[in-house]
Image (cartoon, rainbow, N blue to C red):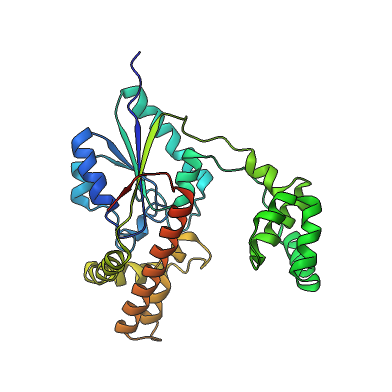
Amino acid sequence: MSRPPLIELIAGPTASGKSALAMARARETGAVIINADSQQLYADLRVLTARPSVEDEAEIEHRLYGVADAAEAWSVGRWSRAVMPILAELAEAGRPALLVGGTGLYFMALTKGLADIPDVPNEVRDAVEQGFNAEGEVVFRDRLSAFDPQAAQRIETGDRQRLIRAMSVAEHTGRALSDWSADTTPLLSPGSWTGSIVEPDRATLYDRCDRRVESMISDGALDEVRALIRRNLDSALPAMKAVGVRELSAHLEGTTTLDQAIAATQKATRNYAKRQLTWFRHQTADWPRAR
C-alpha cells in the first residue's frame, strides 16, 4: 500500500498572507485546505476573520470553515476531534491535506500534543489566588516548588497567572502541572508532516493589518457585528471575543465614532498579530519561514 501524502502545515499571524499561499500550494498539489484558525470556525464571522472568499472555496475544497455557530464554544480538543477524521479520510483516498491558520495551540496539538488537564473549579483557583495575594510571589513560589519544582523554576518572575495555574492544578488533581504537560502524544506521527511559518517583516504585517480592517468595513463588518449584537450572546463566548467585535460594537452602540472604532480595531489587530508572531517564534523556531 502506498504511503499517504505528507500533510502540509502553514501557520502564521493574521494578515500575513497564509490563505493566498495555501491557495497557491493547493493548486500545485491538489490538496484539500483545512482550517486551523479558531475564529474562522464560526459561520457568523466570515468578514471579521477574513475567511477564504466564496470564489476560493468554490475553486479549492475547503474544510472546517464556518462550521460552528457563534453560540458554540469550540476548544482545541473539539477541533482536534473534528480534524482527525478528515485527515484519515484524505489519507485513505491518497489526497494531500493542507492545514492553514493562526491558532498556535492547534498546531501544538498536531505536532507536539496537548495535555488533557482536568478543569480546575473556580473555588479552588480563587482560594489559590487568595493565597498568592496574602503570601506574595516569593513565598508562593517556594511553596509551589514542593508540588511542582519544574514549574516553580520555569515560570518567569512576575508571571502571576501561570504560578496560580500551576498551584491550582497541583492542588486540585494531586499531580504536578509539569507531569500533566509531559504526558502528551502528538496527533500527527513524526515524519507525516511538514510545516512552515508565513512571517512578513513587522512593518509590512502591520500595514496589511490596517488595510485589512478598512476592507472589512467595506465588505460589511458592521452588519456582521450588528447581527451578533441582536442575538444577545454571552460576551465570554469565543466568537464574541473575535478582534473587532468589541470595537465595532462600541460604535454601533453610539459610544465611539466610526473612525475611532476603525482605529481601535486596527490597533487590536496589530496587537493580535504581534502576539501570534511571538508565539510562533518561541514554539516553532525550527520551522522554515516564508516572507
Q: How many marks can you see?
A: 0
**Along the viewing direction, whichever of 101 and 58 lies nearer the viewer:** 101
Q: Could you say where residue 268 lies in the image, as x and y percent from the top left?
A: 40, 71
Q: Is residue 120 visible?
A: no
Q: Could you say where residue 246 lies in the image, as x and y percent from the top left?
A: 43, 73
Answer above or below: position of 114 versus 219.
above
Answer above or below: position of 79 versus 70.
above
**Along the viewing direction, whichever of 72 and 290 lies nearer the viewer:** 290
Q: In the picture provided, is 181 more to the left or to the right than 146?
A: left
* Residue at 75% in and 45% down: 175
* Residue at 40% in and 67% down: 243
* Residue at 33% in and 16% down: 2
Q: Could you say where residue 283 lies in the image, as x and y percent from the top left?
A: 48, 50
Q: Quadrant of the N terminus?
A: top left
Q: In the picture provided, is 74 more to the left or to the right than 118?
A: left
Which residue is farthest top? 1
Answer above or below: position of 93 versus 46.
above
Q: Could you say where residue 61 lies in the image, as x and y percent from the top left?
A: 25, 39
Q: Is residue 256 visible?
A: yes
Q: In the picture provided, is 261 more to the left or to the right than 71?
A: left
* Residue at 80% in and 66% down: 139
Q: In which image quadrant can residue 267 be found?
A: bottom left
